[in-house]
Amino acid sequence: MRRSTAIAPAVRAVLIALLAGPAGCRLGQPQITHSPLTWSEQKAAIFELAPAGTPRAAAIARLEGAGIAGDWGARDTIYYCNLWERPDGARWQMDVALLFDADGRLYDLRPAEAEIRAAPAPPSLGNGSAARAGETAARSRGESLPGEPELRTRPLGPR
């Protein structure tokens, strides 16, 4: 009797799957890395593509045309840039949020993963809502506001 040296197709498939391992889904696609650009450089690059005053649809179309993908916030006033697929094949995780005013025009950018703080008020609002939001954020961090007594908290846990 002669032994067959051929590997059965099912066994071959299992071996390939084991060799590919966790990288199986990522074959052929570079890994996502944090953007090597500083926050200021990311902001400048975004404003170069979509300057302040650009309408919402045009701003997003320009970003997508440059390989930048993102997601809308709860409303269509903030757009989070998540990924920048560069022409050289690099894939950068971004840290930029675009802020749109009530008329749908880009008015500012801020870090997407910022600490809790108020976003600047759109020029068309000017109703003090940003100041109130800033006060709320300061209180949530345990900070006192000017003219208020210092907030004192005790550590949690056994006394």
Image (cartoon, rainbow, N blue to C red):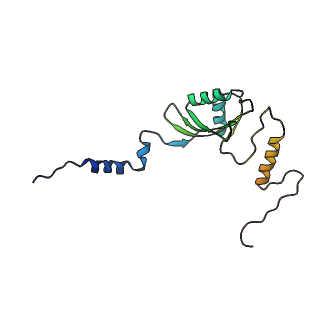
User: How many numbered marks does the figure carry?
Assistant: 0
Percent across and percent down for residue 72 are 64, 38
Residue 69, quarter of the rendered image: top right
Closer to the camera in the image, 36 or 21: 21
Residue sitting at the far front? 75
Residue drawn at (68%, 27%) of the image: 55
Q: In this rendering, is residue 36 above or below 56?
A: below
List x then y, in percent, for residue 27: 41, 42
Q: Position of residue 123 (x, y in %)?
A: 79, 32
The one nearer the camera, 99 or 114, is: 99
Q: Residue at x 64, y 28 (%)?
A: 57
Q: Residue furthest right?
A: 147
**Split into 4 quadrants, where in the image is the C terminus?**
bottom right
- From the viewer's perspective, tell me whether residue 153 is left or right of residue 95: right
Where the N terminus falls, by quadrant? bottom left
Above/below status of 29 relative to 150: above
As drawn, 44 above or below 9: above
Q: At x 79% / y 45%, what residue is drawn?
A: 133
- Furthest residue in direction bottom, as rendered: 159
Q: Is residue 133 left or right of residue 6?
A: right
